[in-house]
């Protein structure tokens, strides 16, 4: 049986965030950068809900790339940040040690840039480390649409699995009867899932008659002007 026929679960997954830093994001042209950050943070919150072991690694923070998004660090306030010089995270022993310590072969990747840091890490971690790599296409970005696309194509040809952040979240949840994570997942959806999240808010309030999730000022009117 192919190892990739196994669905992602909270027990078989770990995640790595590679170079989610402002200077790297400045170069991204394959996805709207605010959407990119939204997706990265949503994915991080999902990992936190399901207790997925996470590695955060950065490159040339002080010299070039800047500090990791504060919204991402806020999800993992106690995590060590593994600084590197190599564009390929697999070249750094601290990264290898972190992945090994987590003890899970399915590695979910969110990083910048797709065609450089993501591709080299994915190929080397799969070939040399025996890891099963799941590349989160919409929580990663390349320097052009073509750069991202052809990097994804190259990785897929090599056996890397393309996924999206919301797909990962819902694959971890799997069953809405799992009430221990249901509310937290719905919270992520409402904040980060765009129209899907808006639909959840609408259904809660208009169909199920639940209270709105924020308090606000008194609703006044209508009062047509004469």
Image (spheres, rainbow, N blue to C red):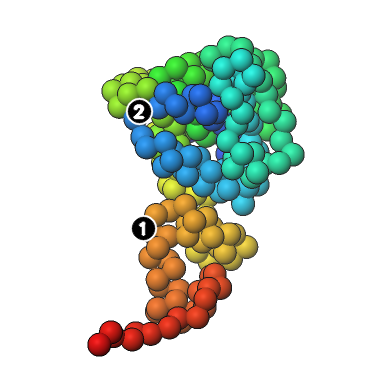
What residue appears at the point 56 percent right and 48 percent down from the top-left corner?
46
Residue 148 x %, y %: 35, 25
The answer to whether residue 194 is left or right of residue 12 is left
What residue appears at the point 52 percent right and 29 percent down from the top-left corner?
22
What residue appears at the point 74 percent right and 39 percent down from the top-left corner?
78
Q: Which residue is mark 1?
A: 195
Element at label 2? loop
Depth order, front residue of 187/220: 220
Residue 209 seen in this snapshot: yes
Depth order, front residue of 4/137: 137
Q: Are marks 2 and 1 in contact (CB under 8 Å)?
A: no
At label 2, counting other C-alpha atoms closer than 10 Å, the crowd grade (few under 14, some 14-19, many 20 or more) is some
Q: Which residue is mark 2?
A: 29
Q: Residue furthest front?
A: 226
Residue 96 x %, y %: 65, 20
Whether residue 20 is situated above or below residue 150 in the rendered picture = below
What residue appears at the point 42 percent right and 36 percent down from the top-left corner?
33
């Amino acid at each position: 049986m192919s190892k990739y026929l196994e669905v992602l679960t909270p027990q078989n997954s770990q995640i790595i965030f590679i170079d989610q830093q402002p200077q790297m994001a400045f170069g991204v042209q394959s996805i709207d950068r605010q959407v990119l950050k939204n997706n990265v943070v949503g994915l991080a919150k999902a990992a936190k809900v399901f207790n997925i072991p996470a590695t955060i690694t950065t490159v040339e923070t002080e010299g070039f790339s800047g500090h990791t998004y504060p919204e991402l660090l806020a999800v993992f306030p106690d995590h060590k940040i593994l600084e590197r010089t190599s564009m390929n995270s697999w070249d750094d022993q601290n990264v290898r040690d972190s992945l090994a310590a987590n003890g899970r072969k399915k590695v979910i990747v969110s990083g910048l840039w797709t065609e450089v840091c993501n591709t080299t890490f994915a190929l080397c971690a799969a070939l040399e480390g025996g890891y099963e790599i799941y590349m989160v296409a919409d929580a990663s970005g390349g320097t052009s649409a073509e750069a991202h696309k052809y990097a994804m194509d190259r990785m897929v040809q090599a056996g890397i699995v393309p996924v999206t952040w919301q797909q990962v979240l819902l694959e971890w949840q799997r069953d809405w009867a799992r009430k221990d994570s249901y509310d937290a997942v719905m919270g992520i959806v409402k904040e980060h899932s765009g129209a899907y999240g808006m639909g959840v808010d609408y259904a809660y309030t208009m169909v199920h008659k639940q209270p709105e999730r924020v308090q606000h000022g008194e609703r006044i009117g209508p009062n047509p002007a004469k």
